[in-house]
Amino acid sequence: MSDCSIGIDIGSVAVKGVLLEGSLLKTAIVPTGWTPRESALQVLHHLCQQRGISSPPYSMPLVATGYGRKYLECAGKHVTEITCHGRGVRHLAPAARTVLDIGGQDSKVILMNPHGGVENFAMNDKCAAGTGRFFQMMAHALEFSMEEFGAVSPEGELQPISSMCAVFAESEVVGHLARGVPRESIVRGLLRSIASRSATMLTKNGLLPPLFFSGGVSNSSCLRRLLEMELKMPVLWDPRSQFAGALGAARIGLEEKTNHGNRG
């Protein structure tokens, strides 16, 4: 298993895991819940099951990232999510120069150099608007699943949302529903507001194309299209975008093992 490594990304909403074997990826994801350590171990177990082993051998690199990375004591290395997201996006979209990552409780803009290294970054962790938590709250208020909420067509009537504070936005949504505004129109209004805020954050921090969208919120096809309309440029995405951090962690583990072996 010299070409295998595991990356675990312990986020505030979900724990993501990647087992990287050559160019093949095996993935697992579970809600973080109240016990990030147990959730991370559950993801690790799922990955090992897919590989047909009970637990990773001592020789297989295991790297943890995300806000809860320290909870996984068995990891051989703990790396910041900025570094891991940059490395993971480099694997998924080598040409990307800017990354927009929207996670459970924060939004990040990462600027990459032509070689895939992180040049600079900016983070918004002061406001929950537009994050995964916000998505969950709004989907629940509108009685949509997360998948249905994110997949609403971007075309059609749009109900503007004046507040992006999670508490006030929910009250505004309830008011629109009481007036008989179609749920899809409200979703478009919410997602347009998120796209507008994201576009502002990107341009403020020196957006360079191509732009890659990662994080769980990037799974929304409607939001991706609205972001493209807001920025007037293509937005790159991959079905494995949510696993970019875990993938980057796995790549770091594998590269360090390779480099160590070469030095040996």
Image (tube, rainbow, N blue to C red):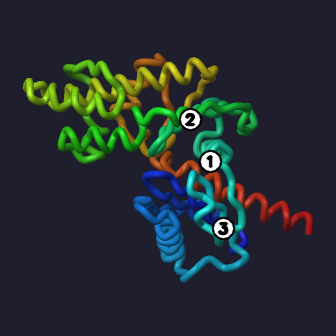
Q: Nearer the viewer, residue 258 or 147?
A: 147
Residue 122 appears at what percent x and percent y?
62, 31
Whole-number angstrom distance, CA of label 1 to CA of label 2: 10 Å
- Quarter of the picture containing the C terminus is bottom right
Q: How many marks?
A: 3
Q: Is residue 106 left or right of residue 77?
A: left
SS class of the residue under badge 3? loop
Q: Amino acid at mark 1?
A: Glu
Query: What residue is rendered at 62% in x and 77% in y?
Result: 56
56 w.r.t. 251: above or below:
below
Q: Which residue is mark 1?
A: 81
Q: Earlier in the sequence, mark 1 or mark 3?
A: 3
SS class of the residue under badge 1? helix
Q: Mark 3 touching mark 2, by CB under 8 A?
A: no
Whether residue 202 appears in this view of the structure is yes
Q: Which residue is mark 2?
A: 108
Whole-number angstrom distance, CA of label 1 to CA of label 3: 15 Å
Q: Earlier in the sequence, mark 1 or mark 2?
A: 1
**What number is the disc on residue 236?**
none
Q: Mark 1 touching mark 2, by CB under 8 A?
A: yes
Query: What residue is rendered at 15% in x and 27% in y?
Result: 175
Q: Nearer the viewer, residue 103 or 222?
A: 103
204 w.r.t. 126: above or below:
above
SS class of the residue under badge 2? strand
Q: Is residue 186 left or right of residue 34?
A: left
Q: Which residue is mark 3?
A: 75
Q: Amino acid at mark 3?
A: Ala
Query: What residue is rendered at 78% in x and 65% in y?
Result: 257
